[in-house]
Amino acid sequence: MGSLTVIVPSRGRPHTVAQLAEAFRATCTEATWLLFTVDEDDPEYQAYVDAVSEQVVRHGRVAVSSQPRGTMVTALNTGAQTLLEAPGPVRPDAIGFMGDDHRPRTTGWDRRYLDALTTLPGIVYGNDLLQGANLPTQCAISAPIVRALGHMAPPELTHLYVDNYWRDLGRAAGCITYLPDVVVEHLHPYAGKAEWDDGHRRVNRPALYERDRDAYAAYWREHQERDVIAVRQAPAGAQHG
């Protein structure tokens, strides 16, 4: 049947634990896990731990892990590596990403993601009501592909252009699926759905856009062929090998 764990890198927003856990409880039809990855020096780290502990009682499939102070991408990759190294029975067949400002709205979205990856191992994403088909601002990736690549996202990136990578990689390898009727809403300030807090301002600075844009362009020029081959050669069957 397959299993999915969604990684949510987060900093300074422990209130999103309850919001996302409730959204998962209301929409998941599979035993999908929600994993928050948080910097160990986050002043709110204990609040995350407390929030997760409370949600485990209510929801049962929420966890938190820590990493040394890093970027969103290092948190995502650290979380993915933790999952890939987990004991076989609990290792997921697919690893997902959401920001702490995403909210799944479609009942059974997790089943739809897993079904898509069974049909075409690779990358699947839904409609975030902001970028739509243009960019997978949230997604799930077959675990063997993450293992073959050695990352969820290029470690050269810090926060931005990760979705460009997933889109371009999926298209180049012929393994990306967009589900327009599966809504995973992105509550981003650009959409007028959230206030510009310190976190949003920090990761949407023009200098960071330029930095990650240039880093991604250089990465894609150098590693596109290698990554596409890794994706195409990743095993489509046994996820726990």
Image (spheres, rainbow, N blue to C red):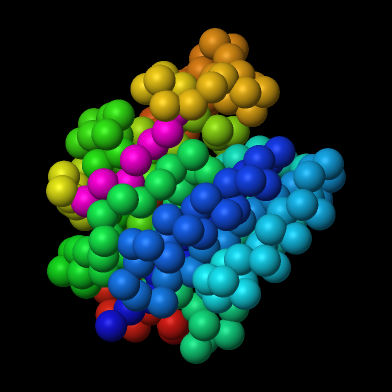
Residue appearing at x 27%, y 73% in the figure: 236
Whether residue 197 sits left or right of residue 178 in the image: it is right
Closer-to-camera residue (175/126): 126
**Number of marks drawn:** 0
Residue 54 at what x, y percent from top left? 67, 66
Whether 137 is drawn above or below 123: the answer is above
Magenta region, residue range: 182-188
Q: Which quadrant: the N terminus?
A: bottom left
Rendered location of residue 191, percent (x, y): 37, 22
Image side of residue 87 versus residue 44, left or right: left
As for residue 184 lying within the magenta part, the answer is: yes
Residue that appears at 48% across and 26% down: 194
Q: Residue at x 67, y 47 (%)?
A: 14
Residue 75, given in percent of the width and then of the height, sits at 63, 49
Does the magenta-highlighted stretch encompass residue 27?
no
Q: Residue furthest bottom?
A: 89
Q: Which quarter of the picture shows residue 235?
A: bottom left
Main secondary structure type of the part rendered in magenta: strand
Residue 72 higher or lower than 232, as above or below = above
Which quarter of the picture shows residue 73?
top right
Residue 107, above or below 236: above
Q: Note whether residue 35 is visible.
A: yes
Is 207 placed above or below 110 here?
Answer: above
Q: Quadrant of residue 11?
A: top right
Q: Looking at the rendering, in which quadrant would you find the C terminus? A: bottom left
Residue at horizontal 36 percent and vertical 57 percent from the top: 140
Is residue 74 at least partly visible in the picture?
no
- Name, please, the residue furthest toward the top: 206
Q: Which of these two is toward me, 238 or 178?
A: 178
Query: Where in the figure is residue 27, as x and y percent of width and height?
Result: 33, 62
